[in-house]
Image (cartoon, rainbow, N blue to C red):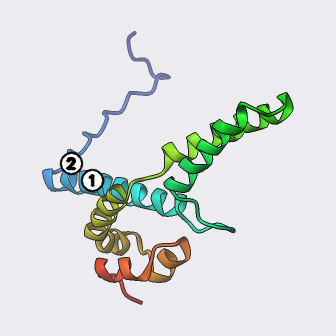
Amino acid sequence: MPTTKNTPKKKARAATPRMSKTHKDALANGRVEGRVIREYLEIVEATKPRRGRRRTAESITQRLAVIAAELKTTDPVTKVRLIQERLDLRTELASMKSKSEVATAEAKFIKVAASFSERNEITFDAWREFGVTAAVLKKAGISR
């Protein structure tokens, strides 16, 4: 279409600036640190103390054995309740993290927590309120 007096001319687009390698590396590092922090915080949140006795994998396994025995001799309504409890216990048992998984996530957290905290302006008190222990924060180099 030919340009006329009434048609505005199209402006040339400015060239988009390219990111430097250091900028790309910093972004990648931030993503890795964020992933490590998120993984550890999910574990902390999942293992927060709740009211009542703390359940262990051993106690859950024992309860599953009791349920298996009770299922053989109980009435239908109780049987349905026991089946549901068994399903819930199996889910809980499957979601429990082993001590080695927790230790690995904690070690990774300790390596990156100080730089993550500084970059995102997260204080010692914020970490503590979430549930991260003071000992872990001290190992990470985060102080009051």
Q: Is residue 120 left or right of residue 51?
A: left
> In the displayed structure, would residue 2 be above or below residue 126?
above
- The residue sitting at the bottom extreme is 144
Q: Is residue 116 left or right of residue 76?
A: left
- Name the image quarter holding the C terminus: bottom left
| Residue 124: % across, % down | 44, 82
| Residue 16: % across, % down | 26, 41
Q: Report the residue at 43% width, 17% height from top.
A: 4
Disc with the residue nearer the chain's start (2 vs 1): 2
- Name the image quarter holding the N terminus: top left
User: Between residues 53 and 30, which one lies in front from this camera angle?
Assistant: 53
Name the mark nearer the viewer: 2 or 1: 1
Q: Report the residue at 36% width, 77% height from top.
A: 136
Q: Are marks 2 and 1 in contact (CB under 8 Å)?
A: yes
Q: Which mark is residue 19?
A: 2
Q: CA distance from mark 2 to mark 1?
A: 10 Å
> In the displayed structure, would residue 111 be above or below residue 56?
below
Q: Report the residue at 29% width, 70% height from top.
A: 110
User: Between residues 102 and 55, which one lies in front from this camera angle?
Assistant: 55
> In the displayed structure, would residue 63 be above or below residue 142?
above
Q: Amino acid at mark 1?
A: Leu
Q: Report the residue at 28% width, 62% height from top.
A: 108
Q: Secondary structure at mark 1?
A: helix
Category of crowding for the residue at label 1, using alpha-carbon neighbours closer than 10 angstroms: few (below 14), some (14–19), many (at least 20): few
Residue that numbered label 1 is attached to: 27
